[in-house]
Image (tube, grey):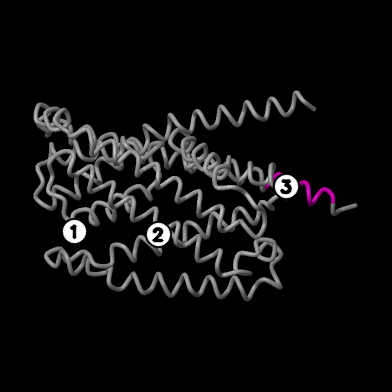
Amino acid sequence: EDSMPSRMATQEESSVLRRRSGRGLLLMRLITTVVVALFVLMAVRRMDMTGFRRALAGASVTPVLLAAVLAFGMQVARAGYWRSILWPLARISLHTMLRYTLAASGASVVLPARGGEALRVWWLHKRHAIPLAAVGAALAFEKMLDVVTLMLVVAPLPWLLPSEPWLGPVRLVTPLVLVGALAVILLARGGRRRLRWLADLRLFDDLKHAGAAFSCVVAAWLLDIVVIGLAMHAVAIPVRLDAALLVLLIVNLAIAIPAAPGNIGTLELAATFALTTRGVQQERAAAFALLYHGVQIVPLIVVSSLSAALMSRGETSAASSR
């Protein structure tokens, strides 16, 4: 009899903690958003807006369109990851997984804290009966592969840019990240018998699927580098591997800090800073940053909105037929 009040008290305490945590995250996001907005305002006030508009208006159309197509290819690669990693649990077609990925990515542009990921988790659980723990583990594994691949891709930077001493730790961080990822995989395989959610995932039953998933993540990052190069070419910035890799590294370090939805402002500041350190004029670097962000989010919002509308219409039709 005494256990029921104690359980109720525990549930109330958990609810209070969740509310406080939610308010804390919201407050942190508001603070970071305000800080980013102030930095953007200061950058705009120092910038020659005439030169910025001239650089943006003079951008070549063909590289921009090609960059938008390859940015869509990044979404296809992400969908390929999810299809491969969850194949032992559900035989989901690439087309269906791409619709989930587009809708989730598009929602994450609008919702804070990449809230669109919750949509994909829900769809995979509701429509394909995949355990929530398994989808969550697949999401965590994707983030781990993102970190591993990013460090592998930018590993040459200390040798390409020896004049930047702050890049020196990359030489140490890269092997540490690889060792950490390998340790996580080995622990996951060893914990299959003790942790039910790992057993449900069946992630490493067939390494062929894990290898295919990793290949898709690598492809997405390599496409990102090409998109950066095309955006640089569009605004007449000399395309150099060191500059492209530096943009990739600094942008991803910056957007790891939660700020405005869609990383608006944060990405532009980071990309502009990265190129100005390589001697690129600020106005031209800012034009590149705006194009680089635009070719990713504008087509994504349009296509994901259409995809979400089609899925909602399909659900409505299915419900009415029942």
Q: Which residue is denoted by mark 3 in the rendering?
A: 11
Say whether residue 117 is magenta: no
| 170 with respect to 125 (left or right) | left
N-terminal of the two: label 1 or label 2? 2
- Circle 2 packing at 10 Å, graded few (<14), some (14-19), many (20+), is many
N-terminal of the two: label 1 or label 3? 3
Percent coordinates x, y for residue 124 in the rendering = 64, 46
Q: Which amino acid type corresponds to the residue marked 1 in the rendered image?
A: Asp
| 38 with respect to 196 (left or right) | left
Q: Which residue is denoted by mark 2 in the rendering?
A: 218
Dot 3: element = helix
Q: Which amino acid type corresponds to the residue marked 2 in the rendered image?
A: Val
Dot 2: element = helix
**Image depth: mark 1 or mark 3 in front:** 1
Q: Which amino acid type corresponds to the residue marked 3 in the rendered image?
A: Gln
Q: Which residue is denoted by mark 1 in the rendering?
A: 242
Dot 1: element = helix
What residue lies at 29% left-to-right and 46% top-to-bottom?
227
N-terminal of the two: label 3 or label 2? 3
| Magenta-tinted stretch | 4-13
Relative height, residue 55 to residue 238 (above, below)? above
- Circle 3 packing at 10 Å, graded few (<14), some (14-19), many (20+), is few
**Image depth: mark 1 or mark 2 in front:** 2
Q: Quadrant of residue 38?
A: top left
